[in-house]
């Protein structure tokens, strides 16, 4: 017999704005009648990919799989500049869904290259965002875990920059490690604020509940960091990829209130499903029959206007519960210039 009576969903969860915008761009392109592709899965979430497929958006692994004149969406992680150029030269309509934060990161990296720094990138070496960054700085040294750090050479002028979803403490620790390795060290902090806010909200919930569930990709850096933070708080935590992994009620034995949070590629709707399933398998008899209602209330409490993130078309339920706010894009003069270039007719880049 279960003991869980209530669930709390962290305040700012669901897709980060970068992921959401890329998904929305793909949906809008397909809805406008274009044959639309995404270069790589827009998020590693089968439900989202299936939903996009149902709306006519196909996922391809290579530009060679996209026919001339059709649209290809660049996902939020961005791509190497040569990939972008090749897409345009092949006559594709390129819909640039690179997150504005990542675009700014790429520009800052390019500046460091132009200024002649030896560059260190903190990131997961094969993560698409890092692969894209290396297109701007092919000689950059990518390091991840602390055991890699001693391999960083000693150079006169060094610069440190990071993949957007790396934890801030790791970035700070690496910066301190590098201080002794360079005469001049330039530090460019590109940790995404969305990641930081999500961590803060996760800690807030973890402190107030008896157990936590973190929903997201098993290999996702930002998801793993949320799990680690719950452990630091001292709250028992289970990390799952989705609702299908919620199957063992024994994990929640004796817990009354369970908190739920998710990585930046996890749809907020998935958190509601996880909440509902948890209550079904581990709920106390006192809440029997009200599982869906309790899960919905938890979602509504999380989905504040300031934090609402979803891939649902604007205005569609449950977004209609609250006004949705799209963060303003940073001005992007380069993209604006590209979008109004003569290439617009064929092989255009659109944002
Ligand atoms: S985590 Fe931040 S930088 Fe990365 S895609 Fe999301 S909003 Fe953009």
Image: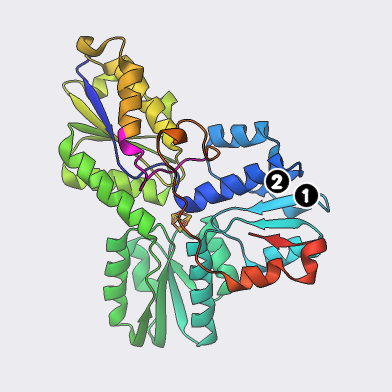
309 part of magenta stretch: yes
Is residue 1 in sight in this rendering? Answer: no
Magenta stretch contains residue 294: no
What is the magenta range? 301-311
* Pointer 1 residue: 66
Q: Residue at x 41, y 26 (%)?
A: 273
Q: Where, by quadrant of the figure, is residue 351 drawn?
A: bottom right
Instruction: Say which quarter of the image contains residue 260.
Output: top left
Residue 31 % position (x, y): 69, 40
In the displayed structure image, the side of residue 318 where residue 182 appears, left or right:
left
Name the residue tied to disc 2. 37
Q: Quadrant of the N terminus?
A: top left
- Labels 2 and 1 touching (C-beta < 8 A): yes
x 43%, y 31%: residue: 270
Other residues around mark 2 within 10 Å, as few (<14) / some (14–19) / many (≥20) = many
Residue 158 at x, y percent in the picture = 41, 83
């Amino acid at each position: 017999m279960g003991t869980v009576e209530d669930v709390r969903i962290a305040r700012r969860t669901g897709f980060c704005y970068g992921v959401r915008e890329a998904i929305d761009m793909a949906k809008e392109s397909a809805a406008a009648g274009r044959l639309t592709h995404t270069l790589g899965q827009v998020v590693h979430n089968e439900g989202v990919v299936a939903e996009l497929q149902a709306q006519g958006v196909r996922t391809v692994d290579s530009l060679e799989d996209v026919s001339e004149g059709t649209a290809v969406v660049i996902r939020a992680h961005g791509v190497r500049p040569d990939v972008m150029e090749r897409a345009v030269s092949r006559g594709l309509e390129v819909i640039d869904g690179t997150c504005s934060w990542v675009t700014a990161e790429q520009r800052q990296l390019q500046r460091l290259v132009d200024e002649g720094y030896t560059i260190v990138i903190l990131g997961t070496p094969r993560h698409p965002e890092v692969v894209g960054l290396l297109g701007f700085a092919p000689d950059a040294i990518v390091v991840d875990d602390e055991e890699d750090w001693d391999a960083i050479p000693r150079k006169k002028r060094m610069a440190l920059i990071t993949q957007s979803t790396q934890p801030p403490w790791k970035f700070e620790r690496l910066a301190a490690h590098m201080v002794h390795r360079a005469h001049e060290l330039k530090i460019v902090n590109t940790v995404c604020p969305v990641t930081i806010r999500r961590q803060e909200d996760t800690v807030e919930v973890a402190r107030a509940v008896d157990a936590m569930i973190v929903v997201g990709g098993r290999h996702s850096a930002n998801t793993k960091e949320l799990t680690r933070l719950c452990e630091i708080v001292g709250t028992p935590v289970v990390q799952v990829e989705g609702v299908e992994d919620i199957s063992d009620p024994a994990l929640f034995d004796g817990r009354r209130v369970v908190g739920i949070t998710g990585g930046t590629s996890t749809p907020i709707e998935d958190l509601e499903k996880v909440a509902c399933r948890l209550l079904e398998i581990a709920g106390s008899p006192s809440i029997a029959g009200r599982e869906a209602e309790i899960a919905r209330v938890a979602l509504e409490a999380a989905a504040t206007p300031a934090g609402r993130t979803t891939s649902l078309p604007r205005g569609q339920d449950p977004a209609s519960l609250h006004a949705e706010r799209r963060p303003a894009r940073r001005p992007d003069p380069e993209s604006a210039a590209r979008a109004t270039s003569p290439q617009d007719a064929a092989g255009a880049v659109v944002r």
